[in-house]
Amino acid sequence: MYDIIEKKGGGEMYIRKNIGAKGRTYLSMVYGYRDSAGKAKQKIVESLGYVDELEKLYDDPIAHFREVAKQRAAEYNDNKKVEFEISKSSKLLSNVNYRKNLGYSVLKKVYNELNIGEFFQCKQRKIDAKYNLNSIFSLLVFNRILFPSSKKKAYESKDRFFERYNFKLEDVYRSLSFFNRYSAELQKHLNEQVVSIYGRDKTLGYYDVTNFYFEIPYEDEDVIEDGKVIKKGHRKNGPSKEHRRDPIRQMGLLMDAKNFPIAFNTFPGNESEKTSLLPIIRRVKRDYGIERIVAVADRGLNTSDNTYLMSGKNDIDACKHNDGYVYGQSVLGADNEFKVFVLDEKGYTEEIKKDKHDKEYMFRIKSRVYAKKITVKDSNGNRRLTDVTYQKQVVYWSSKYAAKQKKERDLVIAKAKDLIANPSKYGNATSYGAVGYINNIKFIKDTGEIPDGLSLSLKLDKIAEDEKYDGYYSIVTSELHLSDSEIIKIYGGLWEIEESFRIIKSEFKTRPIFLSLEEHIDAHFLICFVSLLIFRILEHKLQNLFPVGQIQEALAKYECSYIDENYFLFDFRNEVIEKAEQVFNIDFSNRFMKKSEIKKILET
């Protein structure tokens, strides 16, 4: 049984002489090639006959058929048809993988563009390690983007790529310590590459914090000597965004206006995210040579210290700033003076807007420049210093946002009513949100259960007070010169960092984390950070035409199967792959490709 396919490039054709038992020489035309494992293979193309009989037809049969072989080889290797013999009884050998992914070639091109390999080659010279840092790092990055899994699973599945990964599983874990050691340097290197290739708006830095949980029963203990904390435990219980009770570690991410990650930091789960902003801003300014940066963050980072230290001593007329900020501002959590300003109808302008579904809604906005008094810590850490900073406060209201908040509150109130009627159904972990609207609610410390005999009722006054502020949101900024619309547009870019966290958590399946050593955990975050940067750059190159999941799925599906004679069969192609062809000038349309052709794609 033969299957005819088109052949491009190939091995060699030659004449083989076999000496029989009676001393007669038999000639065969043979095609030699190497299989996917590099093992030499031969296939008889044509049986020619005995030399003594062929001499009746040709003066020199061997010389004659050598010339024929040369011609046949040219035809064989020059876009002609070739026959593959397929045996129905063929068996799969043990520990072989005939299925390979080539979608990662697109990621590799961005990886190489950022010169990550050169960075690790430079570091490799300074360490005593027989394994290749870049080889391990690239595997973990490509696997994290396309086939998210543990480090062990990534190692066990490394044969799905065409790269030669020559290292052991223990080398993967050993390398994590080196990755963590060079983390800050690599972040700086990547920033230089991005600035050089794509440019970067260095004045805006979007910052947010998220957390990652560990499925372990206890948090890490602090190391204490002589009553002092020598080393803090890194996996700590803290406020989880998923309301889980597992120990967590937090990650702060700084991004630019193009949605390209700039830098990240990590800190224990029990530390406040409010104190994480300034260290990363200072590091980026120092290491990246940025003179001034405007931090854009949600209301959780809007503290007196962050406001004071990001804006510095500023003057309303001269508008002299060190750095700047654009923060979200909680209306419910603000002081009474600000709440009066928000609810005062004076100064609002109204307009009708349309959402992305072309549905109309009412929008109202006003702003003011305000001399805000803030109290900050002195050099001893005591909150004593009082100063004034001028900030622009923008307040807006939308009927769409008001309807959304009312709907969300109605669900919370319904849950609160059910809890009051059936307290035994709930506990400390399951009553989240509802307890804020319930009088006299308590929980048993050890079990988290609600004790019997409590007189529970709705906080009707609090519900009425909160309803006053439905639909309102505010933004405060040091950038007094910006218009209201510019401020809203800048702040609106924060959703992109939330999208980045979603990619890391959902698409890259970063959680739960199964590592235990702090340096290994932070190396894991570095791998996720670099994976995110590569993916965001890829989205940019693809002109943001496709959703994240569609890109990831397409590259994971662009695979091939080994057939014979170093040929691979491809069976998937869609609009994402076609767009990647245009962007990277690669031809992914061939149904059959020889390994040498695939290598050229990976090497360019």
Image (cartoon, rainbow, N blue to C red):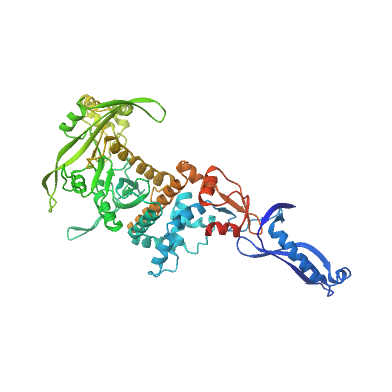
Left or right, 425 with respect to 145, comes to left
Total numbered labels placed on residues in the image: 0
- What residue is shown at x 51% (from left), y 55% (from top)? 157
Question: Which sits in the foreground, 153 or 39?
Answer: 39
Tell me if I can see residue 515 in this picture.
no
- What residue is shown at x 35% (from left), y 56% (from top)? 187
Left or right, 131 with respect to 402, comes to right
Residue 554 vs 164, above or below: the answer is: above
Q: Residue 272 at x, y = what percent?
A: 24, 47
Left or right, 361 with respect to 168, comes to left
Tell me if I can see residue 600 in this picture.
yes
Residue 361 vs 227, above or below: the answer is: above
Residue found at the very far front of the displayed protein:
318
Q: Residue 5 at x, y = what percent?
A: 69, 52
Q: Residue 375 at x, y = what percent?
A: 13, 44
Q: Residue 422 at x, y = what percent?
A: 30, 27
Residue found at the very far right of the displayed protein:
56
Q: Quadrant of residue 22?
A: bottom right
Q: Quadrant of residue 244?
A: top left
Residue 513 vs 463, above or below: the answer is: below
Question: Which sits in the foreground, 82 or 60?
Answer: 60
